[in-house]
Image: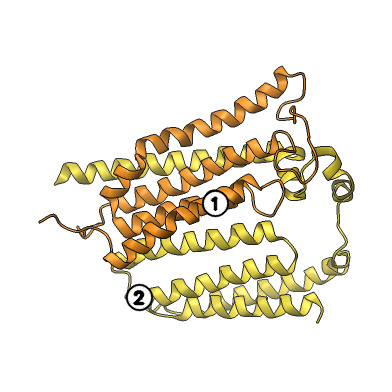
Chain colours: A orange, B yellow
C-alpha cells in the first residue's frame, strides 16, 4: 500500500473545502485594492497562505503535482518584468515612467483608477509566488540530523 | 477613553510578551509569545486607523510563525545553555539607555501633537488624492501612483531576496542528495 503523506483525513477534507474560499478572498482583496483596505501585498499573502495550507495538509509530492512549482517560478520572474513593461508603456503613451496612462473612470467603480488595479494584480502575483517559494524551498531542506523534512 | 490610553495598554502587552518570549525555556511557547507581540502591532495599527497596514501585519505574522515553527520544531533546539550574566555589560547598557532617554526628552517636546502631520505633502494627498488618481483607497493611490518608484524598489528587493535564498538553499539540497 502507498505510504500516506501529510496529515489525517479530517485535515485533508477541511483543506479541500476551504482552500478555494481562501484563494477567492485573496483575489477579492487584490481586485478591490483601489477601493477598500488591502491591495496587492495583503491579497498576495492570503493566496500564499492558502497554498501553504495545502502543502501542510497534503505534503510535498501532491503539492508539486497540483501547482507545478516550475511554472510558479516562471510566473514569479515574469511579474517583475510585467511591472517594468507597464511602466515603459506609459513612456510610449507620452507620459512619465510609471505614470497612469489609462483613463481614470468613475470614483468607487471596480474598473477605475487606470493602472492602479493592474499594478495591484501584478504585485499580488509576485508576493504570493515568492512567499510560497520560500516555504517550498525550506520544506525541502534536509536537516542536519538526517530527519525526514 | 482617548486613543493614547489604548495604545499604551497595547504597548505594555507587547513588552510583557517579548519579556516572556526571552525568559521561557521551551522554544514553542517562546514562538507563540513572539506571535503575541506581532498581534499587538497589528491591533495598534488598527487603533491608529491604518487598516491596510493592520491586514498585512496580521497576515505576515501568521506566515512568520508558521515558518518559525516549521524550522525550529524539527531541530533539537529545545535545550538552552543558561547564559552567564556579565555585570559590566548590564551597567554599560543601562547607562547608555539612560543617557539616550535624557537627550530624547528635548526631542519629544518638539514633536507636533497627535494627529497633526509633520509633512505638508500629506495634506495635498488628502485633498487631491481621489481626484488626481481616481482611486477611492488613498493608500493604494499613494503607493502605486504618487510613489510608484518606491513600489518598484520594493518589488526589486523582494525579487532579489527570493532569488538569493532560493539559489543558496537549492544548492544545499542538491549537495545533500548527492551525499546519500
Please indicate, yes or no, whether residue B7 appears anywhere in the rendered image. Answer: yes
Q: Position of residue B74 (x, y in %)?
A: 29, 65
The quadrant of the picture occupied by the N terminus of chain B is bottom right
Question: For residue B6, what is the image quadrant?
Answer: bottom right
Residue B139 shown left or right of residue A137 in the figure: right
Judging from the image, what secondary structure is the residue with disc 2 in?
loop
In front here: B38 or A36? A36
Indicate left or right for A10 with B120 as reference. Answer: left
Q: Quadrant of residue B25?
A: bottom left
User: Residue at point 58% right, 41% down?
Assistant: A123
The residue singled out by tag 1 in the image is A26
Q: Nearer the viewer, mark 1 or mark 2?
A: 1
For image coordinates 29% across by 55% down, the residue present is: A59
Residue B80 is marked as 2
Residue furthest out toward the left: A1
Tag of residue B175: none
- Secondary structure, mark 1, is helix
Figure check: B50 above or below A131: below
Horizontal and vertical percent position of residue B142: 75, 44
Residue at the location (47% across, 48% down)? A131
Q: Chain of mark 1?
A: A
Q: Depth check: B42 or B107 in front?
A: B42
Amino acid at each position: 500500500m502507498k505510504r500516506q503523506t501529510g496529515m489525517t483525513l479530517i485535515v485533508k477534507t477541511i483543506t479541500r473545502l476551504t482552500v478555494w474560499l481562501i484563494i477567492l478572498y485573496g483575489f477579492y482583496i487584490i481586485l478591490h485594492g483601489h477601493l477598500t483596505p488591502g491591495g496587492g501585498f495583503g491579497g498576495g499573502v492570503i493566496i500564499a497562505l492558502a497554498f501553504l495550507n495545502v502543502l501542510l495538509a497534503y505534503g510535498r509530492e501532491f503539492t508539486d503535482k497540483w501547482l507545478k512549482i516550475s511554472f510558479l517560478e516562471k510566473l514569479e520572474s515574469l511579474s517583475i518584468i510585467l511591472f517594468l513593461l507597464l511602466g515603459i508603456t506609459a513612456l510610449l503613451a507620452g507620459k512619465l515612467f510609471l505614470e497612469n496612462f489609462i483613463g481614470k473612470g468613475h470614483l468607487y467603480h471596480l474598473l477605475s483608477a487606470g493602472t492602479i488595479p493592474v499594478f495591484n494584480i501584478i504585485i499580488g502575483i509576485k508576493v504570493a509566488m515568492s512567499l510560497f517559494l520560500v516555504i517550498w524551498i525550506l520544506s525541502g531542506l534536509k536537516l542536519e540530523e538526517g530527519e525526514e523534512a | 477613553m482617548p486613543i493614547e490610553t489604548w495604545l499604551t495598554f497595547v504597548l505594555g502587552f507587547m513588552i510583557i510578551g517579548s519579556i516572556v518570549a526571552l525568559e521561557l525555556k521551551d522554544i514553542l511557547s517562546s514562538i507563540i509569545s513572539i506571535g503575541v507581540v506581532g498581534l499587538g502591532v497589528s491591533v495598534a495599527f488598527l487603533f491608529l486607523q491604518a487598516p491596510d497596514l493592520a491586514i498585512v501585519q496580521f497576515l505576515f505574522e501568521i506566515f512568520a510563525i508558521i515558518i518559525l515553527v516549521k524550522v525550529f520544531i524539527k531541530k533539537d533546539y529545545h535545550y538552552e545553555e543558561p547564559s552567564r550574566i556579565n555585570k559590566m555589560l548590564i551597567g554599560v547598557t543601562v547607562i547608555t539607555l539612560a543617557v539616550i532617554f535624557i537627550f530624547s526628552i528635548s526631542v519629544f517636546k518638539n514633536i507636533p501633537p497627535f494627529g497633526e502631520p509633520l509633512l505638508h505633502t500629506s495634506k495635498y494627498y488628502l485633498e487631491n488624492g481621489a481626484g488626481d488618481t481616481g482611486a477611492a483607497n488613498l493608500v493604494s493611490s499613494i503607493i502605486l501612483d504618487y510613489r510608484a518608484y518606491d513600489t518598484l524598489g520594493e518589488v526589486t528587493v523582494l525579487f532579489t531576496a527570493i532569488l538569493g535564498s532560493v539559489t543558496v538553499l537549492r544548492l544545499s539540497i542538491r549537495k545533500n542528495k548527492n551525499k546519500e
